Image (tube, rainbow, N blue to C red):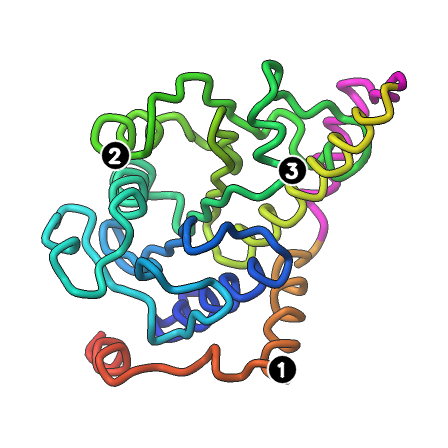
Amino acid sequence: MNQSVEQLRIRLACAFRWAARLNLHESIANHFSVAVSGDGREFLINPYGKHFSQIRAGDLLLVNADDPASLDRPDAPDITAWALHSALHRNQPHARCILHTHSKYATALACLADSRLPPIEQNCMRFFERVVIDEGFDGMGLGDEAERVSRLLGNKPILLMGNHGVLVAAPTIAQAFDDLYYFERACETYITALSTGRELRIASDEIARKTCRQWLEYPGFADKHFNALMGILDEEEPEYRQMNPLATAYTANL
């Protein structure tokens, strides 16, 4: 079911706030976006300098992937955010929601010479053969680097960006956030297991594929997870839903 731009604003604001609550963010860096046009070229993204914990639905900026004038506005997005997400929304239109963070354990995995995530438990198995590892880091995500990174994703939900962080792409905000949460949990388990120095118990490829398939077929999991998160914010931080006049006017004109 298609969601209105207002609903997308509210849900993305929820994702920002929960990323802060779960310590998946990094200062005023990192960025989330969601496409609002059919071709993905118009999308919502966070303004530069706004902390994830304070994002409201009306704070999110509507920008166009083909219009560099988006960077000229006084509340412009971060330059790397606009470059990377513009390239991704242009080149991967199926990736409606894109979440990029430098979360602790995923970034630790991205720093290892071997950044593969072995199937040592069922959260790790959820991402078996579903992660692209970028081994060509060439500086911040600007210009040619943003274009290069944007073409790596393909049909996988996770891009582990070597020497950098993690990027999650999904058709919905709920699915993207659920993947981000569980990928970070899987990385935490793996890094913790490595820290013991003891031999890992690694499942067979057959069992890993079976478990991954079971995850993908689990009924309504991401939506139920995200709706629960929204319910908590509705009680504890209801201001995350606040719109501003410009955002409301845009929504009304769709």
In primary-sequence order, the first of circles 1 and 3 is 3
Residue 237, above or below 165 = below
The residue identified by callout 3 is 105
Mark 1 residue element: helix
The residue identified by callout 2 is 142
Q: Residues within 10 Å of mark 2 (few under 14, many from 20)?
A: some
Mark 2 residue element: loop
Q: Position of residue 121 (x, y in %)?
A: 81, 33
Q: Position of residue 83 (x, y in %)?
A: 25, 41
In primary-sequence order, the first of circles 3 and 2 is 3
From the viewer's side, name the closer residue of 220 and 73: 73
Q: Is 138 left or right of 134, judged from the image as shown? A: left
Q: Residue at x 33, y 55 (%)?
A: 35
Q: Residue at x 43, y 70 (%)?
A: 55
Hey, what amino acid is under mark 1?
A: Glu
In primary-sequence order, the first of circles 1 and 2 is 2
- Residue 205 belongs to the span the image colors magenta: yes
Q: Tell me the CA gap for discs 3 and 2.
A: 24 Å
Q: Are marks 1 and 3 in contact (CB under 8 Å)?
A: no
Mark 3 residue element: helix
